[in-house]
């Protein structure tokens, strides 16, 4: 089953998305997400200049071989640009294989291990009481798990706080926005926020929080310890994780479960974290960690060490990635939770899909393949717009992790 066409589609229905579309000689086509927030055209160019010309004439059925061909064949290994590009091709080939077999993708991945996939939504507010209200809105919508982020008193702008409504989009046009950071304010504030949320919502609601890489190991240890009475589902990205060993320090001090991995692109980024059982949830995603083929290997390694998955699912991952993630989540045994930020109506119109949300859970649907399409003529009406993620500075001007 030869590949006859492979192209990359860049569009901006509210935010930028990069999508690969591969078509075979018998007219079956598949989609893959290649979006890398703030660096979209690097991946688009990697695909159009270096990868897509290699695909024509290849057998679309040889998914593992194509993955190895693109990974080992580049000589230069890993990295978010390379791995997102490979991921998109890989996802599109899985889509084609499942469409050809006339089954939803999860059936090819072993079938359903559960009825539906637990997801968490993002609630945020400008202070504790606003955040309590935002969490209540999600509870009313049926969510069983909710991430809570709040502005920190005294700081101009804080990661994870939306501008009203349910859509949070951190990237901004033209130049990176600037946030402020002061660790002591943050460390004093967050335990108060979660004590209040627990008091309001009782013991059953699953509460999550994203530190977004802004602490040192010993600061993260303090936060994890102080959050223990609030029984978080997880504390995410407590420190930047280039240094995997830093999690040993956090782990020695707290029983608050830890999640990490949204910026990882390879199994080697989390090997120590998993094998030393330094984390509880691995957040690598289909789009940024080499597609279904590579993410399955990460999940299999994690399973042996009691680490469960909790894939990244922010709005900069397109509905194509969301669909792929849901098939993956439904099928693997060591699934934990799936992040779910709702896309805007504009985005959903460009990417019609079969996945659904009900009672705090999602299901990929029964359409053959991924169950997501792209409306190319609508996509063409939203041309690419350069946008950047924010940067973060301490009060003395030092550049800090955002
Ligand atoms: O900041 O995807 O858990 N979710 C997150 C996201 C990331 C964005 C960056 O592009 O941390 O909101
Ligand atoms: Co995060």
Image (tube, rainbow, N blue to C red):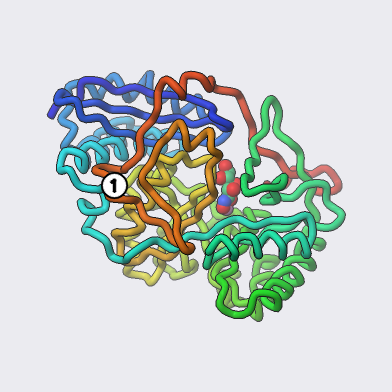
Residue 272 seen in this snapshot: no
Residue closer to the observer: 402 or 287: 287
Under circle 1, the secondary element is: helix
**Count of marks, rendered view:** 1
**Residue 156 drawn at (x, y percent):** 83, 47
Which residue sits at x=78%, y=64%?
A: 129
Does the residue tagged 1 have its C-beta within 8 Å of any atom of ligand 1? no
Residue 203 seen in this snapshot: yes
**Residue 108 drawn at (x, y percent):** 20, 51
Which residue sits at x=50%, y=55%?
A: 339
Q: Looking at the picture, does residue 320 appear above or below residue 229? A: above
Q: Quadrant of the N terminus?
A: top left
**Residue 122 drawn at (x, y percent):** 60, 55
| Left-right relation of 320 to 153 | left
- The residue labelled by disc 1 is 293
Q: Residues within 10 Å of mark 1 (few under 14, many from 20)?
A: some
Residue closer to the observer: 102 or 250: 102
Which residue sits at x=26%, y=22%?
A: 54
Residue closer to the observer: 264 or 235: 235
**Residue 384 drawn at (x, y percent):** 54, 22
């Amino acid at each position: 089953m030869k590949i006859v066409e492979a192209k990359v589609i860049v569009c901006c229905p509210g935010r930028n998305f990069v999508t690969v579309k591969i078509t075979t000689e018998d007219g079956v086509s598949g989609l893959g997400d290649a979006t890398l927030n703030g660096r979209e055209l690097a991946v688009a160019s990697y695909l159009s200049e270096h990868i897509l010309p290699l695909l024509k004439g290849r057998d679309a059925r040889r998914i593992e071989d194509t993955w190895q061909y693109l990974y080992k064949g580049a000589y230069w290994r890993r990295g978010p640009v390379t791995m997102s590009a490979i991921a998109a091709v890989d996802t599109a080939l899985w889509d084609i294989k499942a469409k050809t077999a006339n089954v939803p993708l999860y059936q090819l991945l072993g079938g359903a291990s559960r009825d539906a996939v637990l997801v968490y939504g993002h609630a945020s507010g400008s202070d504790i009481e606003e955040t309590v209200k935002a969490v209540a809105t999600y509870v009313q919508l049926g969510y069983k798990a909710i991430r809570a982020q709040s502005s920190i008193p005294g700081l101009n702008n804080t990661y994870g706080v939306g501008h009203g409504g349910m859509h949070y989009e951190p990237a901004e046009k033209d130049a990176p926005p600037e946030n402020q950071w002061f660790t002591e304010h943050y460390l004093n504030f967050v335990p108060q926020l979660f004590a209040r949320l627990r008091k309001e919502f009782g013991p059953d609601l699953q509460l999550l929080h994203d530190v977004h890489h802004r602490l040192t190991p010993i600061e993260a240890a303090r936060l994890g310890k102080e959050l223990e009475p609030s029984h978080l589902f997880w504390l995410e990205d407590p420190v930047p994780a280039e240094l995997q060993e830093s999690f040993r320090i956090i782990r020695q001090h707290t029983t608050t479960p830890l999640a990490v991995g949204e910026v990882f692109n390879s199994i080697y980024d989390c090997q120590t974290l998993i094998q030393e059982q330094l984390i509880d949830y691995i957040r690598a995603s289909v789009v940024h960690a080499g597609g279904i083929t590579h993410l399955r290997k990460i999940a299999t390694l994690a399973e042996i060490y009691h680490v469960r998955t909790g894939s990244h699912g922010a709005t900069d991952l397109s509905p194509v990635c969301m669909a792929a993630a849901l098939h993956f989540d439904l099928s693997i045994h060591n699934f934990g939770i799936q992040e779910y930020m709702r896309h805007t109506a504009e985005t959903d119109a460009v990417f019609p899909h079969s996945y659904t949300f009900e009672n705090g859970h999602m299901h990929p649907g029964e359409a053959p393949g991924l169950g997501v399409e792209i409306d190319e003529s609508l996509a063409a009406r939203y041309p690419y717009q350069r946008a950047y993620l924010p940067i973060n500075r301490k009060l003395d001007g030092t550049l800090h992790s955002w």
